[in-house]
């Protein structure tokens, strides 16, 4: 049977002489893997419309197993993003991480729209890249990438507790805030004293985490966040991923 999937291409892997297995996240079927035969032969038309993080309509012929990709129609190739080295490297990292975090057939429409929104936002940020300072642009890409991953983790059931202490459940954190990935979020001063593997967070980082749990990705295109808080966020997300 032939299926058409509204897809974001996540990753690809070479197999055999000229084939490839593609991993893509779809609106209709969640995460899917499928084989594209002969796609590495020179002049193979299909390869160009299956590049990483394209938004495309992918047609799969399948009766059982992973099936075969027989066509792909590109809807958006995010050309501004693709033309910027920094954006490209961060998005590649985000897509590979997303691919690792999600199981085959894991399906959530909200996650599909979050993924699509992330690519659209990075693309539109990259469109105006030349009008901005390098550092300001790179910080923004970094911030949006790690907010995206933080929100993906929440959807996958690995959210970060930021309102109450993730260890004792109290709302009063004391004078200082700490993060503990094993406990699943921010911990209070008392609990942090009894545990190892905590790191202290600034008050502004905790405020940022609370905002991320409340607002959508677009919101963060409009506000300024200090580099220090972005670095904390990165550390938190990397720790959270390690514990998944
Ligand atoms: Zn506590």
Image (tube, rainbow, N blue to C red):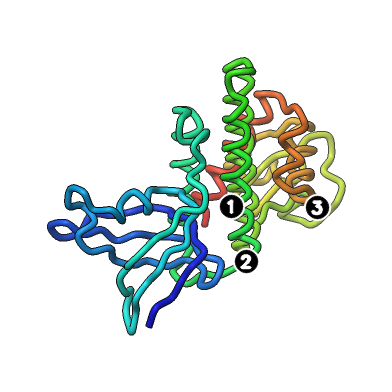
The image shows residue 206 at horizontal and vertical percentages of 76, 39
Helix, strand or loop status at disc 3: loop
Residue 75, x across and y down, in percent: 51, 53
Foreground disc of the pair 2, 3? 2
Instruction: Give the Cα distance between marks 3 and 1.
Output: 31 Å
| Neighbours of disc 3 within 10 Å: few (<14), some (14-19), many (20+) | some
Tell me the tag on residue 116. Answer: 1
Q: Secondary structure at mark 2?
A: helix
Q: Earlier in the sequence, mark 2 or mark 3?
A: 2
Q: Residue at x 19, y 60 (%)?
A: 38
Q: Residues within 10 Å of mark 1 (few under 14, many from 20)?
A: some
Q: Earlier in the sequence, mark 1 or mark 2?
A: 2
Q: CA distance from mark 2 to mark 3?
A: 29 Å
The residue where tag 2 is placed is 109
How far apart marks 1 and 2 lie (CA) works out to 11 Å
Q: Which residue is mark 3?
A: 164
Which residue: 16% across, 56% down?
Answer: 18
């Amino acid at each position: 049977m032939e299926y058409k999937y509204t897809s974001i291409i996540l990753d690809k892997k070479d197999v055999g002489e000229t084939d490839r297995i593609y991993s893509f996240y779809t609106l209709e079927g969640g995460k899917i893997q499928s084989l594209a035969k002969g796609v590495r032969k020179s002049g193979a038309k299909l390869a160009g419309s299956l590049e990483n993080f394209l938004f495309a309509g992918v047609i799969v012929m399948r009766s059982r197993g992973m099936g075969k990709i027989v066509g792909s129609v590109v809807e958006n190739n995010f050309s501004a993003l693709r033309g910027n080295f920094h954006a490209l490297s961060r998005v590649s990292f985000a897509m590979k991480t997303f691919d690792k975090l999600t199981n085959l057939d894991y399906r959530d429409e909200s996650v599909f729209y979050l993924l699509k929104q992330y690519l659209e936002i990075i693309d539109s940020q990259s469109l105006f890249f030349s009008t901005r300072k390098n550092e300001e642009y790179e910080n923004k890409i970094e911030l949006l990438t790690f907010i995206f991953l933080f929100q993906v983790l929440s959807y996958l059931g690995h959210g970060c507790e930021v309102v109450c202490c993730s260890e004792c459940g109290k709302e009063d954190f004391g004078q200082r805030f700490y993060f503990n990935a094993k406990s699943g979020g921010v911990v209070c001063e008392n609990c942090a004293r009894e545990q190892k593997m905590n790191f202290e967070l600034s008050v502004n980082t905790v405020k940022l985490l609370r905002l991320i749990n409340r607002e959508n990705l677009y919101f963060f295109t409009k506000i300024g966040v200090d580099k220090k808080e972005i670095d904390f966020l990165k550390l938190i997300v990397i720790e959270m991923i390690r514990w998944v």
